[in-house]
Amino acid sequence: MNLTTDQRPVAVISGGSRGLGLALVTDFLERGYRVETFSRTESAELTALRESTASDALFWSSVDGTNAEAVEEFVRAAVRRHRRVDVLVNNAATGLEGLLTLTAPTAIDTALQTNVTLPVLLTRACLKPMLARRTGVVINLSSINALRGQTGVAVYGAAKAALDGLTRGLAREVGPAGVRVVSVAPGYFDSEMTAGIGQAQRRRIVRRTPLGRLGSAEDVLGVIRFLTSPGASFITGQTITVDGGYTC
Ligand SMILES: NC(=O)c1ccc[n+]([C@@H]2O[C@H](COP(=O)([O-])OP(=O)(O)OC[C@H]3O[C@@H](n4cnc5c(N)ncnc54)[C@H](OP(=O)(O)O)[C@@H]3O)[C@@H](O)[C@H]2O)c1
């Protein structure tokens, strides 16, 4: 089906410069979406993608997600441009690893701002055009660290558990208006965030994973592709785990 530019759906994806975010931007473009994304810096891969994509299909801005006013202005500009938001993927996040007693309060504050406040504010802003059109999907990137305790990632896990709470509460709030909210909780997959995981820890993760390997961005992408398809139109308020069975 050929859609005019104005009819093509719009996806807002935070943190589209690398890792899962970049894979999501590429996939949504391939599926005919117009994509609005931001990160603090533009990677060489995103620059190349922008150069090879129609100028009315992919928009990127440099935004620090800890700056609430900048996040709201990013959404205002996206809505001015397209007049609609069909999908929001709250993907941008920062890792925080270390024993709590040895973690600086400023690092905790930055992690909570990036991993909780940013997705809450981005969701609040994107919900307005979704509710106006009575349709939309919000995907929150959670983590298996929200579901299982692990030494060294208590704050990161708390932040991701907060997102799962947001998913459940908001699903009740906006479901009657036709908007779905779903969390996706991946296990470990290769990206800049997990580059610090050593070989011994990788072997331990693989041993504990029934499917016998680490995940990939493509594994998570496939689930998000499904959750934003008509086949998932009766799924809301859930956390979908994508971890090869690690938490089973
Ligand atoms: N990798 C894993 O094993 C794993 C497992 C479970 C869950 N997850 C979750 O999956 C999502 C994607 O993870 P990933 O591994 O692909 O991460 P990643 O490679 O570290 O990428 C993170 C993205 O977020 C952006 N970002 C970070 N802080 C930001 C800020 N303050 N303002 C704006 N943008 C910011 C980064 O760009 P800039 O740095 O340029 O700003 C980058 O585009 C995250 O929510 C993560 O928590 C990952």
Image (cartoon, rainbow, N blue to C red):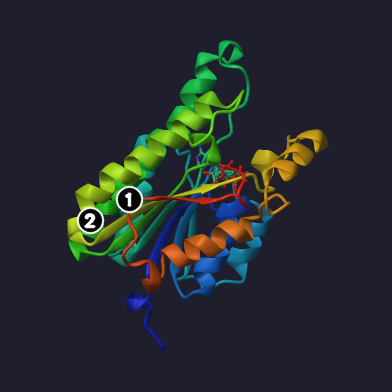
Q: Is residue 72 visible?
A: no
User: Which amino acid does the dot numbered 2 rest on?
Assistant: Gly
- x and y percentages locating residue 32 in the rendered image: 46, 75
Q: Amino acid at mark 1?
A: Gly
Judged left or right of residue 209, residue 22 is left
Q: Is residue 192 visible?
A: yes
Residue sitting at the far right:
199
Query: Residue visible at 58% across and 33% down?
Result: 95
Disc 1 from disc 2: Cα separation: 9 Å
Q: Which mark is residue 237?
A: 1
Which of the image's four quarters has the C terminus? Answer: top right
Residue 171 locus on image (x, y percent): 27, 50
Label 2: which secondary element = helix
- Comparing 173 with 200, the one in front is 200
* Disc with the residue nearer the chain's start (1 vs 2): 2
Marks 1 & 2, CB-CB < 8 Å contact: yes
Quarter of the picture containing the N terminus is bottom left
Task: Report whether 101 appears left or right of 201.
Answer: left
Residue 218, placed above or below residue 245: below
Q: In this rendering, is residue 67 above or below 3?
A: above
List x then y, in percent, for residue 137. Answer: 34, 59
Residue at 66% from the left image edge and 52% from the top image edge: 215
Give 161 or 124, whichever is nearer the viewer: 161
> Which residue position is annotated with label 2?
175
Q: Classify mark 2: residues with Cα within 10 Å, few (<14), some (14-19) or many (20+).
A: some
Left or right: residue 208 versus residue 132 is right
